[in-house]
């Protein structure tokens, strides 16, 4: 993300977006941490702490891609599964690296009010199925609540 975020922002962000890197996003978040990062920004801190060359990042990305495909594909084939479930996005990063669609929906809240999510992961090109699974889960669970300060 250290390299990709900069490229993404340079290519797609409007000129109104002033941040240009993960470090700048972190600084922006700290200007109002209560609103912008109520649960912290550990992922961004990890990104900034990473010190690999671009070649090392490319090699790591390839390794993660192939290991991720095996991680998801093997149980899906073995057990004839349409999707895998994960809690709180724990496997969403691996799914993204393996190019498997993932969608997280609310499944409740902790005692402190932090959201908990259920992540659906499917094989590539099965996005319609993942939306269907999530819609059916949300309709039956009724656990999605609008944020306390939300207004239409």
Image (cartoon, rainbow, N blue to C red):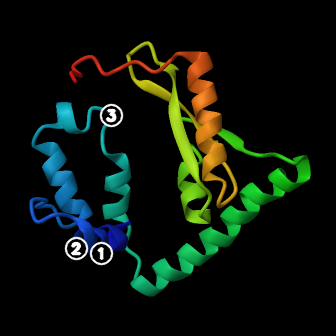
Residue 100 x %, y %: 62, 58
The quarter of the rendered structure image containing the N terminus is bottom left
Residue drawn at x 77%, y 59% is 73
In the drawing, does residue 69 fall left or right of residue 101?
Answer: right
Q: Nearer the viewer, residue 66 or 84?
A: 84
Q: Residue furthest bottom?
A: 55
CA separation in Å, label 2 and label 3: 27 Å
Give the labeled residue for mark 3. 39
The mark nearer the N terminus, 3 or 1, is 1
Numbered label attached to residue 7 = 1
Label 2 with label 1: CB-CB less than 8 Å? yes
* Residue beneath disc 2: 10
Give SS at disc 2: helix
Q: Mark 1, residues whose alpha carbon is within 10 Å: few (<14), some, or many (≥20)?
A: some
Whether residue 111 is visible, yes or no, is yes
Label 1: state its secondary structure: helix
Residue drawn where x is 40% and y is 83% of the image: 53
Vertically, is 27 above or below 1?
above
Is residue 89 visible to us here? no
Position in image of residue 116 (x %, y %): 49, 27
Q: Is residue 108 left or right of residue 74?
A: left
Which mark sits nearer the N-terminus, 2 or 3? 2
Q: Which mark is residue 27?
A: none
Q: Is residue 3 above or below residue 28?
A: below
The residue positioned farthest toward the right in the image shown: 78
């Amino acid at each position: 993300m250290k390299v990709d975020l900069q490229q993404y922002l340079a290519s797609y962000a409007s000129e109104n977006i002033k941040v240009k890197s993960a470090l700048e996003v972190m600084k922006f978040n700290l200007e109002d941490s209560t609103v912008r990062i109520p649960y912290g920004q550990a992922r961004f801190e990890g990104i900034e702490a990473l010190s690999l060359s671009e070649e090392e990042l490319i090699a790591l990305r390839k390794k993660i891609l192939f290991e991720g495909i095996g991680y998801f594909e093997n149980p899906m084939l073995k057990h004839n599964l349409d999707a895998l479930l994960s809690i709180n996005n724990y496997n969403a990063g691996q799914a993204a690296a393996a190019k498997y669609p993932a969608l997280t929906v609310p499944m409740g809240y902790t005692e402190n009010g932090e959201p908990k999510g259920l992540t659906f992961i499917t094989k590539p090109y099965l996005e319609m199925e993942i939306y269907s699974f999530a819609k059916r889960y949300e309709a039956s669970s009724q656990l999605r609540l609008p944020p306390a300060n939300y207004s239409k």
